[in-house]
Image: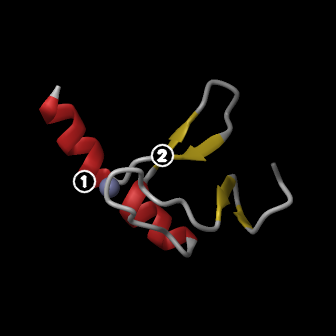
Amino acid sequence: MSSCNEIKSCDYELPKTCPCPECTTIANSLSELEDNFGCRKMEDEKIIPQSWCRECRIKGVKNK
Ligand SMILES: [Zn+2]
């Protein structure tokens, strides 16, 4: 899983492109990832990027 392009900084570990399954928004940098997707902290302290962008997560919540 760690052989493809990754940006590593601080505790972040993210794929270089993470298209949102809903709108294909991608993040090309840590700042874009934070802006477009956001991250969440897992129980083991690992920080992972959200798979859906912020907008789609908001819409998804509202649709349900
Ligand atoms: Zn999206």
Depth check, front residue: 11 or 27:
27
Q: Secondary structure at mark 1?
A: helix
Relative horizontal placement of residue 48, taking residue 60 as reference (left or right)? right
Count of picture labels: 2
Q: Nearer the viewer, residue 51 or 11?
A: 51
- Specify the amino acid type for callout 1: Glu
> Residue 23, position in %: x, y?
32, 59
- Residue depicted at 21% across the width and 33% down the height: 61
Quadrant position of residue 3? bottom right
Q: Residue at x 29, y 43 (%)?
A: 57
State left or right for residue 13 relative to residue 24. right
Check the picture and name the quadrant holding the C terminus: top left
Mark before the other along the chain sequence, 1 or 2: 2
Residue 8 percent across, percent down from the top left = 74, 64
Q: Which residue is mark 2?
A: 50
| Label 1 neighbour load within 10 Å: few <14, some 14-19, many 20+ | some
Ligand 1's quadrant is bottom left
> Which residue in the structure is indicated by mark 1?
55
Q: Secondary structure at mark 2?
A: loop
Amino acid type, label 2: Gln
Residue drawn 23% across the image and 37% down it: 60
In the image: residue 48, left or right of residue 59: right
Residue farthest bottom in this picture? 28
Task: Quadrant for residue 47, please give it.
Answer: top right
Residue 49's x, y, as percent? 54, 49
Dividing the picture into quadrants, the one containing residue 10 is bottom right
Q: Which colour assignment does the render follow?
A: secondary structure
* Residue 40 rendering spot, x and y as whole percentages: 50, 40
Question: Quick check: 53 above or below 27?
Answer: above
User: Is 24 situated left or right of 9 in this image?
Assistant: left
Q: Residue at x 60, y 31 (%)?
A: 42
Does label 1 point to a residue whose CB lies under 8 Å from ligand 1? yes
